[in-house]
């Protein structure tokens, strides 16, 4: 992920965004066009919910009316009533609410790409499922490419169009959920996705989701 936003410069190969090599782009402009959501959320504690969501649009010099409308639109999109949450501070939010605000902030400026590093790892299973549903809805509505890091196999299968399995910094398998479950090709991938019975059950669900 750090190579995508140029926090780490690759020693070989290229990273492209919308067909453009990120190494040729101004880092500030590049990063303002990418959304970020992380496990630690990273909301600014001294800012209200509305101010947190508005950070990037304001950096891009959106008008005040446009920023306010966008904040309300996004809070509603992540199922947080703007009238109730706009003026709250991060300390007033539950873990799930904070994650929702983090997602709203990440997509506020309509980014071409959204980087998500285990964003739902710190919330309970019920909230996690709800946030996954919201992410799927948002990604489809905005047609945004999402690069999502997770150690949860079922989360990957539920969210991904394509999965990249990495081990020790190298790619060991890449493909759709159905392709990987049907043909793991690698002992590590086979073990990661479960024994024959659990893999068959996951394959059945993946086929239904893909149909």
Image: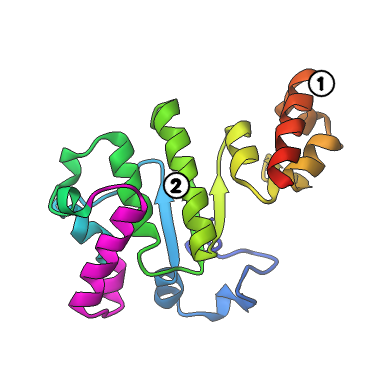
Name the image colouring.
rainbow
Specify whether residue 74 is painted magenta.
yes
Task: Give the mark nearer the N terminus: 1 vs 2.
Answer: 2
- Residue 211 picture location, percent across and down: 74, 46
How many residues crowd mark 2 within 10 Å: few (<14), some (14–19), many (20+)? Answer: some
Task: Identify the mark at residue 196; answer none if there is no mark.
Answer: 1
Query: Residue 129, relative to residue 19: is it above or below?
Result: above
- Residue 111 picture location, percent across and down: 45, 68
* Residue sitting at x 46%, y 80%: 26
Specify whether residue 78 is painted magenta.
yes
Query: Residue 123, relative to residue 47: is it above or below?
Result: above
Provide the residue designation for mark 2: 134
* Residue sitting at x 55%, y 56%: 146
User: Which residues, given as a range, are shown in magenta?
Assistant: 56-81
How many badges with numbers are in the image? 2
Q: Nearer the viewer, residue 9 or 37?
A: 37
Q: Nearer the viewer, residue 81 or 4?
A: 81
Is residue 41 visible in the rendered image? The answer is: no
Task: Identify the mark at residue 100; answer none if there is no mark.
Answer: none
- Residue 59 picture location, percent across and down: 28, 74
Would you say the magenta stretch is mainly helix, strand or loop? helix
- Quadrant hosting residue 28: bottom left
How many residues crowd mark 1 within 10 Å: few (<14), some (14–19), many (20+)? Answer: few
**Are the two marked residues, 1 and 2, in contact with CB atoms closer than 8 angstroms?**
no
Q: Is residue 34 left or right of residue 79?
A: right
* Residue sitting at x 40%, y 41%: 39
Task: Give the CA separation, mark 1 to mark 2.
Answer: 31 Å
- Residue 17 picture location, percent across and down: 59, 71
């Amino acid at each position: 992920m750090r190579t995508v936003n140029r926090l780490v410069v690759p020693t070989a190969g290229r990273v492209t965004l919308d067909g453009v090599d990120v190494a040729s782009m101004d880092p500030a402009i590049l990063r303002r066009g990418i959304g970020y959501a992380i496990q630690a959320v990273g909301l600014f504690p001294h800012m209200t919910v509305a101010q947190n969501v508005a950070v990037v649009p304001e950096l891009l010099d959106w008008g005040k009316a446009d920023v306010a409308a966008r904040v309300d639109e996004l809070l509603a999109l992540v199922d947080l009533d703007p009238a109730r949450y706009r003026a709250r501070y991060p300390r007033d939010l539950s873990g799930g609410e904070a994650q929702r605000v983090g997602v709203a902030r990440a997509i506020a400026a309509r980014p071409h790409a959204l980087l998500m590093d285990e964003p739902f790892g710190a919330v309970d299973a019920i909230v996690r499922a709800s946030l996954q549903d919201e992410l799927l809805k948002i990604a489809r509505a905005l047609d945004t490419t999402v690069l999502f890091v997770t150690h949860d196999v079922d989360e990957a299968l539920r969210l991904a169009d394509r999965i990249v399995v990495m081990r020790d910094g190298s790619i060991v398998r890449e493909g759709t959920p159905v392709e990987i479950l049907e043909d793991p090709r690698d002992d590590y991938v086979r073990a990661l996705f479960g024994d024959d019975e659990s893999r068959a059950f996951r394959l059945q669900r993946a086929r239904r989701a893909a149909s």
